[in-house]
């Protein structure tokens, strides 16, 4: 492959575009999340806990398609900052259940406000139908990669 062919490939690479969008999106969240005491890197983990209080740590790993060690580190950061508590699962002592603290419950409205504002910026100029189609396409891509 020559440089021109590589450049053409790169211009049409969905992964490169998704990766860039991911970085831009996370960068735009840094300041507003810091203002409420959150770190952007721990946000996906905290959102999983807010969606399902008492979620098993391993289920967070699977839901986010992340390495178990990265999940453990992120949850440790959240625990150190007082956003979550981890407790032994009564049914399986090898598992940890993760719970949102009162501190998290107090700021969840602020988190959702930040994320809603961010989502509006992401989909600025899109119709509701385009937004739905885009999200459906991303879900299909995710399923394609899970089932390869």
Image (cartoon, rainbow, N blue to C red):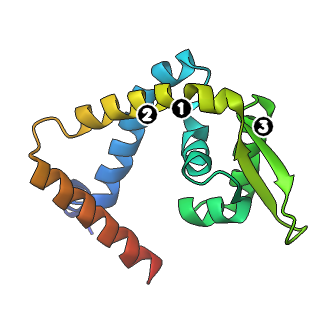
x 39%, y 75%: residue? 143
Label 1 sits on residue: 108
> Residue at point 43% right, 33% down?
112
What crowding class fits label 1: few (fewer than 14 Cα within 10 Å), some (14-19), or many (20 or more)? Answer: some
Residue in the image at 46% along x and 20% along y:
32
Label 3, residues with CA under 10 Å away: few <14, some 14-19, many ≥20: some
User: Is label 3 or label 1 in front?
Assistant: 1
Q: Compared with residue 40, is residue 86 higher up or lower down, i.e. above or below?
A: below
Q: Nearer the viewer, residue 83 or 12?
A: 83
Tag 2: Cα neighbours inside 10 Å, few (<14), some, or many (≥20)?
few
Q: In the rendering, at what x and y percent does residue 139 appear?
A: 33, 66
The secondary structure type at the circle numbered 2 is helix
Labelled pair 2, 3 in contact (Cβ < 8 Å):
no
| Left or right: 138, with 148 as reference point | left
Q: Are marks 2 and 1 in contact (CB under 8 Å)?
A: yes
Quadrant including the N terminus: bottom left
Residue 28 against residue 84 in the figure, above or below:
above
Across and down, in percent, residue 77 comes to 74, 36
Q: Secondary structure at mark 1?
A: helix
Tell me the number on the disc at residue 112. Answer: 2
Can residue 93 be seen here? Answer: yes
| Screen quadrant of the C terminus | bottom left
Left or right: 44 in relation to 57: left
C-alpha span from label 2 to label 3? 20 Å
Q: Is residue 20 left or right of residue 49?
A: left
What is the tally of numbered marks visible in this picture?
A: 3
Q: Position of residue 86 (x, y in %)?
A: 81, 48
Q: Nearer the viewer, residue 75 or 54?
A: 54
Residue 6 in the image, given as x and y percentages of width and height: 26, 61
The residue at which mark 3 appears reads as 79
Res. 144 image quadrant: bottom left
Tell me the CA gap for discs 3 and 1: 16 Å
């Amino acid at each position: 492959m020559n440089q021109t062919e590589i450049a053409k490939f790169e211009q049409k690479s969905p992964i490169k575009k998704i990766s860039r969008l991911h970085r831009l999106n996370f960068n735009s969240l840094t300041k507003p999340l810091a203002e409420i005491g959150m770190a952007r890197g721990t946000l996906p983990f905290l959102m999983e806990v807010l969606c399902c209080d008492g979620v098993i740590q391993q289920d967070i790993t699977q839901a986010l398609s992340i390495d178990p060690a990265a999940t453990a580190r992120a949850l440790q950061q959240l625990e150190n900052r007082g956003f979550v508590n981890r407790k032994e699962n009564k049914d399986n002592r090898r598992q940890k259940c993760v719970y949102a603290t009162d501190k998290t419950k107090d700021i969840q409205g602020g988190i959702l406000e930040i994320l809603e504002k961010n989502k509006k910026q992401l989909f600025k100029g899109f119709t509701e139908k385009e937004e739905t189609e885009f999200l459906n396409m991303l879900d299909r891509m995710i399923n394609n990669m899970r089932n390869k």
